[in-house]
Image (cartoon, helix red, strand yellow):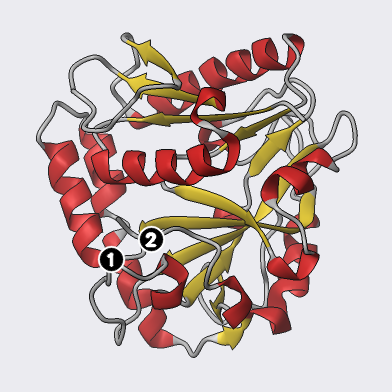
Amino acid sequence: MNIKVLTNVRADSYFLELWLRHYGGIFGRENLHVLLDGDDWEPQADLSGLSVHIARDVPEARTGRDNFTANWQSALAKRLLNAGADVVLRIDIDEFVAVDPRAGLSLPDYLGRLAPGAMCAALGLDVIQGPSDAGLDRSRPILEQRRNAILTREFCKLVAVRRPPRWASGFHRSRRVAIDIGADLLLFHLALFDRTVADRRIAERSAISQHRTEGSHISGRLDRFAELQASTALPFDDVAQRGRDQIMAAVPSPTGPHPGHITDGNAPRGYHVWLPDRMTGLLPLPG
């Protein structure tokens, strides 16, 4: 099975290193494609053995930047599929896709079982450092230390494609494609899994030129650390299928369906959940 993995990055050394280590270990670095957003910064990571692309004329404002990136990577995915790739897996630099261990499948095996022409989304889990969570222990896997997450439509993204996509801005969906969240396919969003890492990331991005809309987008999410204080975590297994069903009950639009809304959540964006023991080894050491 020929699987290619795509992402894009701008001034984000920590997650670039983690992303390369995680996906390179699973698929091999020769199958990774990284789009560098602009040539006005120097990646602090080993880029050997992978395909590196540089976009020099990316729009500065966030909306234009997101549209540019979605169109650019849609075109790359099409080229890779036409050149013989069986599956293209596309994930943001701070997102980590894995298969629920109850399925008994590795991620490559899971993707290899997707039907021809499949356009498969993952169930989105926004992992956030809880009020009582200690600082990171670099010797223990991430999900051993961070068990609080928000199950939310926000990160139920279209990640695995077996035919050319037309990703919309933000990669949440492809135009005129049904919302299909694969059973047991999970996406862990780690932007806020640790407050120290989040603050360091903001500082690194602030050290280079950026549009005000980019800075406000990042810093505007910091209030989500407090999101966990207003609710008690529900066991993931109690609400996962209910959340998946609601999100797949798509919202129609002129450009095709959007992920549906969770209407009975215990948090503003969905379900505040506690991740089960079986998931603790899914993600790498924090580095």
| Residue assigned mark 1 | 138
| Residue assigned mark 2 | 285
Assign a secondary structure to mark 2: loop
Instruction: Tell me which residue sits at (31%, 9%) in the image.
Output: 56
**Residue with the most extreme right position:** 115
Assign a secondary structure to mark 1: loop
Disc number at residue 68? Answer: none
Residue 93 at least partly seen: no
Which callout, 1 or 2, points at the residue further toward the start of the chain?
A: 1
Q: Camera-side residue: 130 or 173?
A: 130
Instruction: Kindly check if marks 1 and 2 are in contact, taking CB atoms under 8 A apart as contact.
Output: yes
Residue 242 in the image: above or below residue 197: below
Residue 141 at least partly seen: yes
Q: Camera-side residue: 169 or 181?
A: 181
Instruction: Tell me which residue sits at (59%, 86%) in the image.
Output: 234
Residue 171 occupies quadrant: top right
Residue 9 occupies quadrant: top left
Residue 260 in the image: above or below residue 30: below
Amino acid residing under circle 2? Leu
Instruction: Tell me which residue sits at (49%, 37%) in the image.
Output: 24
Residue 276 in the image: above or below residue 153: below
The CA span between labels 1 and 2 is: 6 Å
